[in-house]
Image (cartoon, helix red, strand yellow):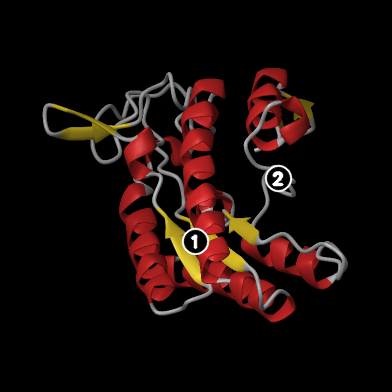
Amino acid sequence: MGGAWGGRRFDDIAHVFETMFQKGKGGEVEALALGISGDVAPNLLWRIQNGEMPDNLNPKVWWVLIGTNDFGKHKCSEEIVLMGILRVVEEIMHHKPDATIVINGILPRSSRPDGKLVGGDDKNNDDDDDKVIDFWPAIQAVNENLQKICEKHDQLEYFDADSIFIKEKRSKKYIPSALMKDRLHPTALGHKIWGEAIVKKLSEILNRDKKER
């Protein structure tokens, strides 16, 4: 959420992150974005195991979002994507047993020009098969399992972002272009609304932890 994809920096998104997650710029909470554009669960696991989770980095909450590229780039099955996410979470739990870990459900995505999650406009001028794949059923299946697992572990919390990015029209669910222009990466507005929900969830966790001490 720091504002860079594929080596390009998106200043409007970076600005949203800074104003929400840097106290020196008006944010309610202090956060550090460690995500890498195009990352997949095995790569993230490798980074955690090889120095990107140092002993002196100890936030109270770790926020994890990974998995969409495992579907899109590597064409992984639901089972493999779920296992990859859980292995990452397991590694964080091992290294940071006192922290709360929030698993952000995989964000909705659409390969269709009209943004519909299932069905809709299949027309495209390219030969790119990804443009007509319905990712949503598989994403839903993984997210449902993640939520169930989080409910069984005190150290884990699940965060559902579906209502932020999914709208409904004529009984069809779709992703508005204002929130995800390419129906994959949130726009600055999408980041802002999502960020506000994240801050609210973080505040609830941090306030709860204070009361329990």
Secondary structure at numbered mark 1 = helix
Q: Is residue 4 left or right of residue 123?
A: right
- Report x, y in % for residue 65: 57, 53
- The amino acid at mark 2 is Ala
- The answer to whether one can see residue 5 in this image is no
Quadrant of the image containing the C terminus: bottom right
- The answer to whether one can see residue 174 in this image is yes
Choose between 12 and 212: the one closer to the eye. 212
Mark number for residue 148?
none
Choose between 103 and 155: the one closer to the eye. 155
Mark 1 residue crowding within 10 angstroms, few (<14) / some (14–19) / many (20+): few
Q: Quadrant of residue 11?
A: top right
Residue occupying image coordinates x 39% and y 79%: 152
Mark 1 or mark 2, earlier in chain: 2
Residue occupying image coordinates x 68% and y 76%: 91
Quadrant of the image containing the N terminus: top right
Q: Is residue 39 left or right of residue 110?
A: right
The mark closer to the camera, 1 or 2, is 1
- Report x, y in % for residue 201: 48, 49
State the residue position of label 1.
Answer: 208
Choose between 211 and 73: the one closer to the eye. 211
Residue occupying image coordinates x 40% and y 43%: 108
Residue occupying image coordinates x 63% and y 70%: 88
Q: Give the distance between the C-alpha atoms of the residues marked 1 and 2, in whole angstroms.
A: 18 Å
Q: Quadrant of residue 18?
A: top right
- The amino acid at mark 1 is Arg
Q: Is residue 85 left or right of residue 8?
A: left
Mark number for residue 31?
2
Secondary structure at numbered mark 2 = loop
Q: Is residue 202 left or right of residue 53?
A: left
